[in-house]
Amino acid sequence: MRKSIAESITSTVKDLNQSGLIDEITMKNIENLCIPEIQEYNPEKIVNIRKKYHLSQAALASIFNISLSTVQKWEQGHKKPSSASRKLLDIIERKGLEAFI
């Protein structure tokens, strides 16, 4: 879903909630449907994210509960992150490590 469409939907839903036409639970459910599509992460981008937060490969592996060799393979381009790992990379990229604490 394009960002502008998701923003429009979210804004409209918040207005409807403030007007009392939909409740909080419905608003949160609709907002969750507007979650952005998770992008692909190439080796360079993974290294950049890791270095931005001063993480070793072992530390990133520990946060993701994966092996060190998996992180190494990502960074060498021999393997691509799974959809769950891409989601975690996306969270780190958008919200920082604080999102995991």
Image (cartoon, helix red, strand yellow):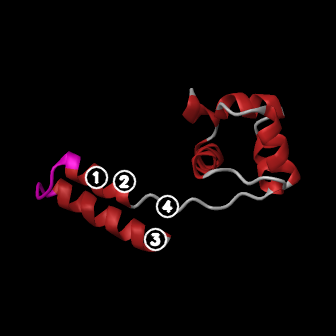
Pointer 1 local density, CA inside 10 Å: few below 14, some 14–19, many at least 20: few
Q: Quarter holding the C terminus?
A: top right
- Looking at the image, do the residues carrying marks 3 and 4 touch, with CB atoms under 8 Å apart? yes
Residue named by callout 1 = 29
Q: Residue at (75%, 32%) from the top-left corner?
A: 67
Q: CA distance from mark 2 to mark 1?
A: 5 Å
Q: Earlier in the sequence, mark 4 or mark 1?
A: 1
Magenta run includes residue 5: no
What x and y, as percent, mark residue 48?
Answer: 81, 49
C-alpha separation, residue under disc 1 versus residue under disc 3:
16 Å
Q: Badge 2 is on which residue?
A: 32
The reply to whether callout 2 and callout 1 are in contact (CB within 8 Å) is yes
Q: Is residue 19 above or below residue 91?
A: below
Q: What amino acid is labelled 3 in the image?
A: Met
Q: How many marks?
A: 4
Which of the 4 image quadrants contains residue 56?
A: top right
> Is mark 2 in CB contact (under 8 Å) with mark 3?
no
Tell me the tag on residue 1: 3
Reading the chain from its start, which is encountered first: label 1 or label 3?
3
Numbered tag placed on residue 36 in the rendering = 4
Secondary structure under tag 4 reads: loop
Q: Nearer the viewer, residue 10 or 33?
A: 33
- Crowding near pointer 3: few (<14 within 10 Å), some, many (20+)? few
- Magenta stretch holds residue 21: yes
Q: Residues within 10 Å of mark 4 (few under 14, many from 20)?
A: few
Query: What amino acid is at disc 4?
Result: Pro
